[in-house]
Amino acid sequence: MYLKFFGPLAAIEEAVNSAMTTETNASDALGRCLGDYKKWRDDLIVLISRYHEWLQAEGVTDGKDDLRIFELIETLKSDKLIVAMVGEFSRGKTELINAIFFADYKQRLLPSEAGRTTMCPVELQYDDNHPPSIELLPIETRKSTETVAEYKRSPTHWATVSLELDDPEAMAAAFNEIVKTKTVGIQEAQALGLYNPNAPESGSKVTVPVWRHAIINYPHPLLKQGLSILDTPGLNSLGTEPELTMSMLPNAHVVLFVLAADTGVTKSDLEVWKKHVCVAKGEKNGGRIVALNKIDTLSDELRSKEVVAASISRQVQETAAALRIPKNHVFAVSAQRGLIGKIKQDPAMITESGLPALELKLSDDIIPSKQALMRSKIVQEIGGTIDTTRAMIETRLSGTCAELKELKGMSGKNQDVIQGMVAKVAREQKAYDRELANVETTRAVLEREIKLLLDCLSIQAFDALIAKTRNEMQGSWTTHGLKAGMKTFFDGAMMTMEKVHKQTRRIKKLVDTIYKQFQIEHGLVKLKQGSFDLAPYHNEFKRLRTEAEVLRNSPAMVVTEQHFVIKKFFITFVSRARNLFDECNKGAEQWSKAIMAPVFAQIHEHKSMLDQRFDSLRKIHHSLDNLNKRIGYLEASKKQLETQERMTDDILAKIDQSLWPQEAPPPEEAGAARGAA
């Protein structure tokens, strides 16, 4: 698709500014949902910021907690909702982007031209920290072992083209960069990993793209609200830039797979679907939507509307059967008719285009799945901290209420009775201190067990596995040896996952044993201790291993030179697996802290309450004048604690709030989700 701008750019910018004050015409449902989601996110930022201020005032956080909360707030502020457009060449992906997201421009914002197409993945987004521009990563970076994600952290490698919003010709030239290609020799193409010996190339030259990746930063209202669109090239680029399949597509909240109604599901379409979409989003139907585009090509003046409708229905049925998905996940549309209908404000044409149903499905899929992911992120990052402080507040409140009741019942009591109460609390103190000594011994055991867990998941341990795999593959002279090295790597990783599973169960059992003892004997606030959720990491490793099996068993393994196979394996799989191990390590560390902290916070808070109770009784025994002073102090503390309790409840309620009431989880399920994370 050859991207350029038609018409005066000042008019486009005016349309952008106008659209900011009204609902987006491109998709009212999506615009409203984005607005609701943004409000939910902004409310959480305010609540978490206030909560953090309270934590700091109470002195109950350390540097790691402060950093984690700060990073979470920044994540909420910079949050993106990613829609990935996937399909073969000439399926109308760009026209669909225009029709769904940018019709309020009253023209094609990103028009396409027959015979031209983007040669690299394009991310369309907006970051107000940077001016409107296109950032381009040179194709030569493919020679290194660094991924696109790693290059994103190093801006010096990118070429930047400014987008002059008031200069149509400059804008057209800027977007023209995306489609540029050049010819190189076979040796250079091989070094770039872009040489296919079976491709019909002329002579000794190979055509390759100039750029490896493009990021467009453009101030459109939907992009400003956090929407990000990933426009992928066709099959060849998906295959040669494996990071698309292994990282970018899985990170998309919805993959919109675009087919052409006039061709149906071709062999190459099916290959993209199976090898890329299904691998990225799993075999479940969530997060995958199919657009059967160009239905306008099926109609003509010699066929009645009923015949055309039957033909479209048959194509939808056959598409669903070929892709093995429910029929209601396939949407027959005409992006061209929908775009023109929106520009002309013709409701009948818009309805006939089929776009409204697709847009509604997009809004129903994108926001709920994104909110679920963000909710999980929040729970993972600060869920343990919130539970710890919530338990601490409950313990203080419970102790305060109990002491208030006790002190109010002391009016008129003589000194002997009060002395008896002092002696009773002193005995409780001594017994509790003896139990605390045992707890500290058990805590030391727990910390050793947690260290074993984190050592198992350490980058150093994983790098040792990487080194073993690399040596095994480089020392091999046969394809069989290379395959064996790949198997060694994944077998080692999965074995580590099994060790982690056993170790986390052992840790949880130890914590549960400690807590039950104190909860039964001293009436501590009941906590639901969640297990470490290893499933996301385990499933991701399984997905990586499945994709690696495709490489291991592909004919390319036989014809490709050894060092290219090793390079592709390490860039595509090992680097992602290493990041996954690091994420798992951090998740395990947070879980271990989250499962221990509330328990030990309650135990020590109970000790503090006992000490305060003993001290106040001693003072009252010394002089009854202290009784009313203590009661007044406790009543003020009770009100303050109730305010703090409501604050934590507000955060938990906001985290659990669904933007769609019919999908809100029952309170016990929401609580269980927090505990599990």
Image (spheres, grey):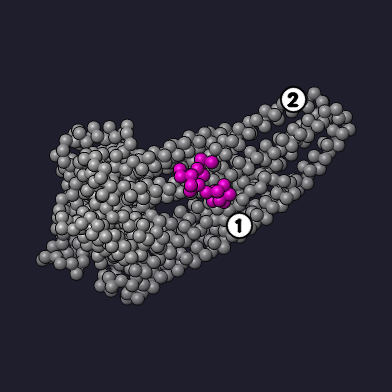
Q: On the picture, is 360 further left or further right than 539?
A: left
Q: On the picture, is 653 further left or further right than 79?
A: right
Q: Is residue 618 visible in this depiction of the protein?
A: no
Q: Nearer the viewer, residue 426 or 256?
A: 256
Disc on res. 78: none
Residue 382, image x, y percentages: 52, 44
Residue lying at the far left of the rendered structure:
203
Q: Is residue 528 above or below residue 467?
A: above
Q: Is residue 552 visible in this depiction of the protein?
A: yes
Residue sitting at 52 percent across and 56 percent down?
533
Tell me the SS state at disc 2.
helix
Q: Which mark is in front, 1 or 2?
A: 2
Q: On the picture, is 13 further left or further right than 609?
A: left
Residue sitting at 18 percent across and 64 percent down?
187
Mark 1 and mark 2 residues within 8 Å of each other at the beta carbon: no
- Structural crowding at the residue carrying mark 2, measured as other residues with C-alpha within 10 Å and reported as few (<14), some (14–19) or many (≥20): few
Residue sitting at 65 percent across and 54 percent down?
512
Residue lying at the far top of the rendered structure:
625
Q: Earlier in the sequence, mark 1 or mark 2?
A: 1
Residue 78, image x, y percentages: 39, 41
Q: On the picture, is 55 further left or further right than 536?
A: right
Q: Calculate the distance from the C-alpha at mark 1 to the C-alpha at mark 2.
A: 45 Å
**Most prominent secondary structure in the magenta stretch?**
helix
Q: Nearer the viewer, residue 376 or 164?
A: 376
Q: Is residue 397 above or below residue 525?
A: above
Q: Which residue is mark 1?
A: 507
Q: Which residues are magenta?
A: 653-673
Q: Give the residue type at disc 1.
A: Ile
Q: Which residue is mark 2?
A: 629
- Structural crowding at the residue carrying mark 1, measured as other residues with C-alpha within 10 Å and reported as few (<14), some (14–19) or many (≥20): many
